Amino acid sequence: MSLEQQISKGIMEAMKAKDTVRLGALRNAKKYIIEAKTAGPEITELPDADVLKIISKLAKQGTDSAAIFSEQNRPDLASEELAQVAVFQEFLPRQLTPEELTAEVKAMLAASGYPGMKIMQFAFDSRESGNYLPHTYPRNSVVYTGTHDNVTTEGWRSNASAEDVAYACRYLRCAPEDLTEAMICACLSCVSDMAVIPLADWLHLDAEARINTPSTQGANWQWRLPQPLTPALSAHIAELTALYHRVPGEEL
C-alpha cells in the first residue's frame, strides 16, 4: 500500500474513531498531496518519495511552531502541534539512534576505502562520545589537531574544562602551556597516513584565529595570516616534518 493510500485509509479510520487530532493532521497532509498531484501533469497517485517530503515538511513546521508556542508560554498550543507531529512521524522512516548511525557510517567508510577523519581535540573533550585517542587511529585516516570548524588548540585549552585539559596533559605528557605543541607532535607521530596542522596552531594563536563556527553567519572565514612565517617557525615546521617522517614521498 502506497503512502498516499495509507493516509487516505488513516483519514477514514480517524473519522470513525472521532480522533480529531489525527484527522486534522492527515487531512492537512492529504491537502498538500492533492495540490502536488495537480501542480503538473495529471497523475493518479503521488510517489512515496514526494509524499515523504510533504510529511517531513509538515512535521518540521509543527515542531518549529511548538517551540515558538512554548517560548510564548502557550503550552496548550504547543501540545496540539506536537500531537499532530506525532501523527506525521508514524509515516516517516524510523530515525536511527546515535549508536546505529555511528555504526552505519563506520560500515560505509570501511566499504568505501576512503580515509576517516580524526580530530585530536575531540580525543580529550569529555563532551565527545567517540573514541579519538591517538593510539586507536588506523593507518587509513587523516588526523588534525582541529579543522577550520574547530577553535584553535590554544582556544580549546582556554575554554575546555580543567578536567579535560588535565587529562590531555596526562595523556600527552606535557604541561598545560605546552599542550598545543604536544598535540601537533602527537598528530605528526601517529600512524595516520596524513596529518594536517592548521597554521593558527603552528602559530599557537588563541580563539580569535578561528576560521569558522558552524551554523553561524557574519564573522566566519575572515582570519588572515598577519605576516609571513618567521625563519625560526619555518625551520621548526621543517624539523618536525622530517623528524616524524612526514616529508612528501617518504615512506615510514
Image (cartoon, rainbow, N blue to C red):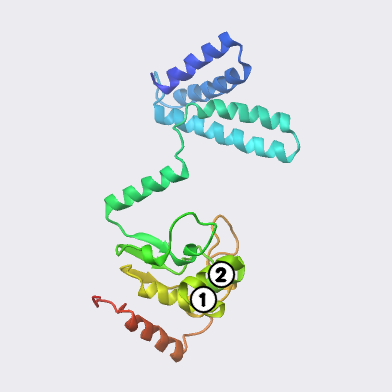
Seen at 43% across and 27% down, the residue is 40
Measuring 47% from the left and 63% from the top, which residue is drawn there?
Answer: 123
Image coordinates of residue 182 in percent, x first then y, are 46, 77
- Secondary element at image label 1: helix
In the figure, is residue 191 to the left or right of 40?
A: left
The C terminus lies in quadrant: bottom left
The image quarter in which residue 44 lies: top left
Q: Residue at x 32, y 52 (%)?
A: 109
Identity of the amino acid at label 2? Val
Residue 99, picture quadrant = top left
Q: Are the residues flagged by discs 2 and 1 in contact, CB closer than 8 Å?
A: yes
Q: Residue 179 carries which label?
A: 1
Secondary structure beneath label 2: helix
For the point 55% across and 61% down, the residue is: 213
Badge number at residue 162: none
| Tag shown at residue 165 | 2
**Residue 160 appearing in the image:** no
Q: Three-letter amino acid code at disc 1?
A: Leu
Classify 10 Å Cα crowding around label 2: few (below 14), some (14-19), many (20 and above): many
45 lies left or right of 10: left
Q: Which of 160 and 144 is in front in this view?
A: 160
38 above or below 104?
above
The spot of residue 176 in percent (x, y) is 56, 77
Viewer-closest of 183 and 18: 183
Task: Tell me where residue 43 sits by quadrant.
Answer: top left
Q: Residue furthest top?
A: 16
* Cα–Cα gap, marks 2 and 1: 8 Å
